[in-house]
Image (tube, rainbow, N blue to C red):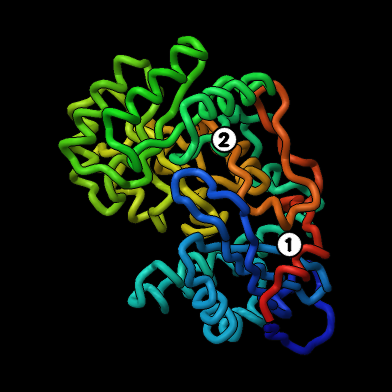
Amino acid sequence: MTISAAGSPATASEASIAHIGTRFLRIPLGAARGGSGATEVQVVFVTVADTDGIEGTGFTFALGGGAESMQAIIDTEFAPAIVGKGLLAWDRTWHDIWHTTHRLGRGVALPALSAVDIAVWDIRGKRSGQPLHRLLGTYREDVPVYGSSRATHTMSTEELIAGTRSYLDEGYTAVKLRAGARSAEEDLERIKAVRDAVGTTVRLMIDCNERLDFATALWFGRRLEDLNIFWLEEPLISDDIVGHARLAAQLRLPIAVGEHLLGRFEFAQYISQQAAAILQPDAPLMGGVSEWMRVATLAEAANVSLSPHCFPELHIHLCAAAKACSYIEHFPLIDGILAEPLRAERGVMRPPDRPGHGIRWNEEAVERLQVR
């Protein structure tokens, strides 16, 4: 759907948002990915154009269904309120939208706002002729990357070892494995086999995808410490801030949380309760580029590390601009609609120099996967 505003082209200082269009996509993933077991990702693809005809693109997504509701709130609530607003006033517009929808809860409204925000920042970059990371303020030219897509609960131990080695052969020095769907004892044996196969110089992260109870997480975490694991991700449901804080206080192993957190206030609670040492904000879900950078400031002030969830093509710019960022994640979730997926070289990724976020979409695939 498209919402447009009529009018003549504006000057650079007067440019405003002229129209917002949305498309709903279903992207098949084939075999289950990561720890969620998802075989499809739903994407709300957003195009925003300003009064000079410059277009920006953004997106949000859902792994468990329900992305249609995100598209609906953009079409029926956000677009009529945003079209006609000046680009220079976007920060105020962002907060206005947040205030008018926060009583609804954050699970639909904030991911939907994320998609529009990403598109607006894409326009900002294109108008300035700068890649997004330059516009935000580049801190580093490349970002370390860890491999995350070649380990699932259904794989055999031999397949886990092979997947980890394949990342190492490509120059990666850090790899994430999954746990929680099997017994803690079996997961421990599988992780130990990978550690024995690749040696102690490789950083291994373990993602439990919110599957453990507190007692199991504590038992499991203490044994992972003996295997020199780099972090333990989402051992408990992400709503349990107190539980994560208790774990963090009793383990030497750092706790990582964030892909299910929406907005700076939820991240601030983890920081204030010292419940995580690594935060994993996901810009297409938690408020877009604008809110992601606010969380980055909180993390830097608290000396907490950032390692965003998925989508390296977008997050590479934010990590290049955020001093607190430690890693970017290689997890190909929307490669089915990308014309040029970002690649790692010798264990690092570099942002493209194209204006805006620089993501190149496969328009044929976007058209083909659109649900009409």
The residue sitting at 76% across, 50% down in the picture is 358
Asked if the residue under mark 2 is in contact with the one under mark 1, i.e. CB atoms within 8 Å, the reply is no
In which quadrant of the rendered image does the N terminus lie? bottom right
The disc labelled 2 sits on which kind of residue? Arg
Residue 87 visible: yes
The residue sitting at 51% across, 63% down in the picture is 62
The residue sitting at 62% across, 36% down in the picture is 320
In which quadrant of the rendered image does the C terminus lie? bottom right
Q: Answer above or below: position of 334 versus 61.
A: above
**How far is mark 1 from mark 2, CA to CA?**
34 Å
Quarter where residue 8 is shown: bottom right
The disc labelled 1 sits on which kind of residue? Ile
How far from the left and from the top, in percent, is residue 91?
A: 55, 64
Taking depth in this image into account, of 27 and 269 the one nearest to the observer is 27
Instruction: Look at the numbered disc 2 and give the secondary structure of its residue.
Output: loop
Mark closest to the chain's N terminus, 1 or 2: 1
Mark 1, residue position: 123
How far from the left and from the top, in percent, is residue 243?
A: 19, 43
Q: Answer above or below: position of 29 versus 256.
A: below
How far from the left and from the top, in percent, is residue 96?
A: 47, 74
How far from the left and from the top, in percent, is residue 355?
A: 79, 51
Taking depth in this image into account, of 338 and 82 the one nearest to the observer is 338
Taking depth in this image into account, of 157 and 69 the one nearest to the observer is 157
Instruction: Look at the numbered disc 1 and give the secondary structure of its residue.
Output: helix
Which label sits on residue 150? 2
The residue sitting at 57% across, 20% down in the picture is 173
Say how many tags the image has.
2
